[in-house]
Amino acid sequence: MRSAKMTEVLYGSTDIGCGDAFDFSNCARNMALESMGVKAPVIKSTGTTIVAAIYKDGVVMGADSRATAGNIIADKHCEKVHKLTDSIYACGAGTAADLNQVTKMLSAQLRLLELNTGKKARVVTALRRAKQHLFSYMGHVGAYLLIGGVDPTGPHLYQCSANGYTQSKPFASEGSGSYAATTILERDFKTGMTQEEAVLLVRHALEAGMHGDNASGNSLNFVIITPESTVFKGPVVPHFCVRPEPVELDYKFKLGSTNVLKQKEIKYDIVESMDISH
């Protein structure tokens, strides 16, 4: 039996308000689908923090190094900053195996393109190849990418979701730690930053994501891409990720310090023994 409120929503006789910043019109669609037995998709955490920002002369990109399997830390040294060409890199969040294969495929395709044309590949070419591949799988390949680099048209940064949706951004973050990282990026980003300011911004954003998200951490790696060179730095271990010194205290208590509440004596016979003294 449908409730009166559900009937109003399904048949459009109720008004779903839209605020200045949020649009709730899809609520009616979701409730209708749910009433027809369609199972809602399960929201999954990518367990990562990746950050990138454009500055005056290039791009700075970085990522943490923690890979998780559920609530278990599976790898403390996972490489999430992937080289596509000498001047184009991709940071990945999502399924580690999918990310490795997708970035390897992109790297091979771009290298073949450079060999065939005799020119450096452009960042938008890497983006287009990634989005066409991911869109064909409709989100079943779990690769969320930040693709950035420098080409003859200047520095570029793109965000690419697993379903093939892409955006061009001056700064971006992805992963479960992206909420904390975005707050730093939105607060401190400014157009025309120097390289030192951009590196500091990306590092602070990564540390915020790693500190605020249990699925991100251990260490961070980042790459600085300029028209002249590409410099990879890492791993850098933030102060809150440094393992504390072991506490060596004497916990030996004297006999009788703890009260014995119950005792039980078990008698047994040795049926067979193996003498290994010889």
Image (cartoon, rainbow, N blue to C red):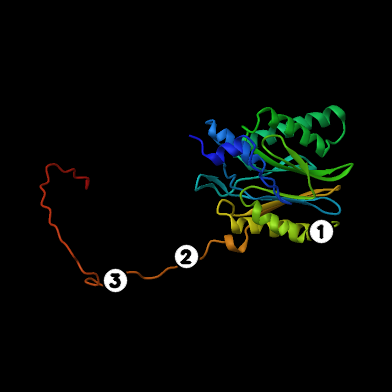
Q: Is residue 160 visible?
A: yes
Decide which of 30, 257 is in the foreground and name it: 30
Residue 40, quarter of picture: top right
Disc 2 + disc 1, Cβ < 8 Å: no
Q: Disc 2 and disc 1: Cα gap in Å?
A: 42 Å
Name the secondary structure under disc 1: loop
Question: How far across and down, in percent of the image, does residue 5 sit?
Answer: 56, 41
In x, y percent, where is residue 174?
67, 47
Question: Could you tell me how far apart the alpha carbons at marks 1 and 3 are, in whole angstroms?
Answer: 60 Å
Q: Nearer the viewer, residue 41 or 17?
A: 17
222 in relation to 95, above or below: below
Residue 143 position in % (x across, y down): 65, 38
From the viewer's perspective, tell me whether residue 119 is left or right of residue 50: right
Q: Is residue 15 left or right of residue 31?
A: right
Q: How many residues crowd mark 1 within 10 Å: few (<14), some (14–19), many (20+)?
A: some
Which image quadrant for residue 274? top left
Q: Residue at x 71, y 34 (%)?
A: 164
Under mark 2, the amino acid is: Pro
- The amino acid at mark 3 is Phe
Instruction: Measure how far apart labels 2 and 3 are at the Cα level.
Output: 20 Å
Identify the residue shown where x is 66% and y is 51%. Answer: 178
Q: Is residue 271 above or below residue 254?
A: above
Q: Nearer the viewer, mark 1 or mark 3?
A: 1
Q: Quadrant of residue 188?
A: bottom right
Binning the other alpha carbons within 10 Å of mark 2 as few (below 14), some (14 to 19) or many (20 upward) gives few
Residues at marks 1 and 3 touching, judged by CB atoms closer than 8 Å: no
Residue under pointer 3: 253
Q: Which residue carries the number 2 mark?
A: 246
Q: Earlier in the sequence, mark 2 or mark 1?
A: 1
Residue identifier under label 1: 190
